[in-house]
Image (cartoon, rainbow, N blue to C red):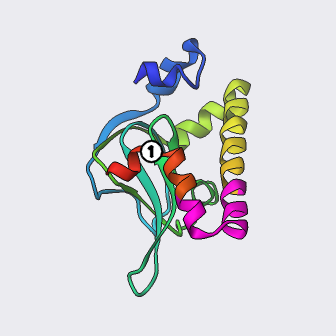
């Protein structure tokens, strides 16, 4: 895990993040966050794969996004506004995460400018992904989007 975190954090900050979290296993099909739940946690994906998914009243599922290892998962807007999540976060393979309580994360960002800058980097990355997804949905047909998806996540085709 430390090696993965070193990809996104300076070495001297890795233990700081680990110290506020707890390593947990999430099995295939388990939810990290459920629709309707007020999230009070986020997680760094050490290994595994997750999806953000909406499920409508008829039980039809709509995948909002796929999250791979070395990324964070949460329903961030719901977490910061203390409101219900509109989507589920589901493990789509057996996974290991570093679960971080929001209050401990908030404490870090309130006391150290490094973590504010780190959060800004995460938000910028998320915004860029969201912007690309919206552009692709508006401008590309389903076949082209699927081919691009397979290029970005080639292991998904085999799974």
Q: Residue furthest top?
A: 12
Quarter of the figure that contains the N terminus? top left
The stretch drawn in magenta includes residue 2: no
Span shown in magenta? 131-146
Residue 121 % position (x, y)? 70, 35
Residue 41 at least partly seen: no
Residue 50 falls left or right of residue 127: left
- Residue shown at 27% from the left, 53% from the top: 28
Residue 124 appears at what percent x and percent y?
72, 42
Q: Position of residue 77 (x, y in %)?
A: 63, 58
From what the image shows, is residue 81 above or below residue 125? Answer: below
Is residue 143 on the magenta stretch?
yes
- Measured along the vertical axis of the image, is residue 12 above or below residue 92? above
**Is residue 62 rendered to the left or right of residue 83?**
left
Task: Tell me which residue sits at (67%, 66%) in the image.
Answer: 140
Dot 1 surroundings within 10 Å: few (below 14), some, or many (20 or more)? few
Specify the farthest residue to the bottom.
58
Label 1 element class: loop
Which residue is disc 1 drawn over?
A: 154
Residue closer to the observer: 38 or 64: 64
Residue for point 47% across, 30% down: 20
Q: Is residue 66 above or below residue 112?
A: below
Where residue 40 sits: x, y (%)? 49, 52
Q: Front-most of 7 and 23?
A: 7
Residue drawn 66% across and 29% down?
115
Above or below, comparing residue 53 to residue 126 in the picture? below
Main SS of the magenta part reads: helix
Query: Which image quadrant is residue 109 in?
Result: top right
């Amino acid at each position: 895990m430390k090696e993965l975190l070193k990809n996104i954090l300076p070495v001297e900050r890795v233990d700081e993040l680990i110290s506020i979290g707890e390593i947990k296993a999430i099995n295939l099909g388990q939810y990290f966050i459920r629709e309707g739940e007020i999230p009070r946690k986020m997680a760094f994906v050490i290994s595994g794969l997750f999806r953000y998914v909406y499920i409508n009243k008829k039980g039809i599922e709509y995948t909002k996004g796929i999250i791979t290892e070395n990324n964070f998962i949460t329903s961030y807007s719901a977490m910061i506004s203390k409101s219900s999540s509109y989507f589920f976060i589901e493990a789509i393979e057996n996974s290991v995460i570093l679960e971080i309580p929001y209050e401990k994360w908030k404490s870090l960002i309130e006391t150290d400018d490094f973590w504010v800058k780190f959060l800004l980097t995460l938000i910028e990355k998320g915004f860029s992904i969201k912007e690309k997804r919206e552009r692709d949905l508006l401008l590309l047909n389903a076949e082209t989007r699927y081919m691009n998806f397979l290029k970005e996540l080639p292991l998904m085709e085999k799974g």
